[in-house]
Amino acid sequence: MTRRRPATRAAFRADFFRFLSFVLIFASAIAGDTTLFRELAQPRYDGGMIGYLEGTVHSLSPTHAIIIVSGVGYKVALTKSTLAGLSKGGPAAFLTHLAVREDALDLYGFANADELRLFEQLRTVSGIGPKSALAILDIATLETLRSAIGHGKAEYLTKVSGIGRKTAEKIVLELRDKVGLSSEDAKAALKGDEDALEAMRSLGYSQQEARDALRKVPNTIEKGTDRLREALKILGS
């Protein structure tokens, strides 16, 4: 018996996943739940079969959530900010991107179309996989990220594990004219974040702790000292 070639295995899994999705939709209709039928009529933001999920949170981990939809549990990778807004047993709804690999089919969830769009733009850059793209979304708000890319701040992206200087510069080169420049508030906040990050590192906070706190500070607070003060309040709460 010949072994199935890697490309054939990936295609087989993709076809099987599509078939499973159709079964789920059919079962939902029989049960009187037409939600998935309605969602199929909505615009899709990715090329995969599953473009949207709406259900109940079964469980949470630091990187994923299990979402129950009509009795089927979907493992969805999410940003930390999205995960922070979920609770076990509570409702959840995401736009999704299905990443097909040789040995897996991975779902990534997004709170809105802008977040998904930037994720997919990052994926067009050679060397940026879905995990790296999601990690970049965790650096800061979308506005601040677009500002960093649009203004050529490659060093702002190098703090992500696996993203070196050359890769960050490639992201800036290929996407700076595509992401659109963000507001002046975001540009000023970006400069303030750079100053605040330096100060927080000197105070003993890790890069991740500092970024997570600064992400929660509104872009309307621009000065580095003011953003530092607000970030320290968040860390101390």
Image (cartoon, helix red, strand yellow):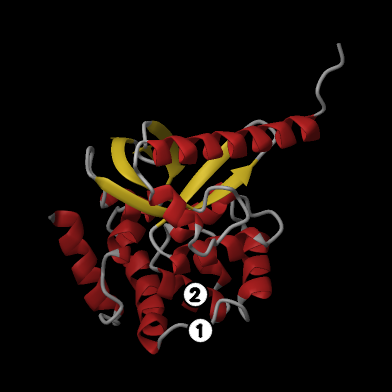
SS state under label 2: helix
- Residue drawn where x is 87% and y is 16% of the image: 2
Q: What residue is disc 2 on?
A: 146
Q: What amino acid is found at the position of numbered circle 2 in the picture?
A: Arg
Left or right: 154 as drawn, with respect to 68: right
Residue 189 vs 8, above or below: the answer is: below
Q: Visible in this render: residue 201?
A: no
Task: Give the SS element for disc 1.
Answer: loop
Which quarter of the rendering shows the C terminus?
bottom left
Q: Does residue 66 appear in the picture of this structure? A: yes
Residue occupying the far top of the picture: 1
Q: Residue furthest right?
A: 2
- Residue tagged 1: 181
Dot 1 or dot 2: first in sequence order is 2
Q: Are marks 1 and 2 in contact (CB under 8 Å)?
A: yes
In this rendering, is residue 37 above or below 118? above
Residue 236 x, y percent position in the rendering:
15, 55
In front here: 215 or 35? Answer: 35
Estimate the x, y position of residue 132 in percent, counting from the top left.
55, 51
Residue 220 got which mark?
A: none
Residue at (66%, 31%) from the top-left corner?
Answer: 103
Q: Position of residue 189 (x, y in %)?
A: 35, 78
Residue 1 lies, in percent from the top left, at 86, 11
Q: Residue at x 48, y 38 (%)?
A: 26
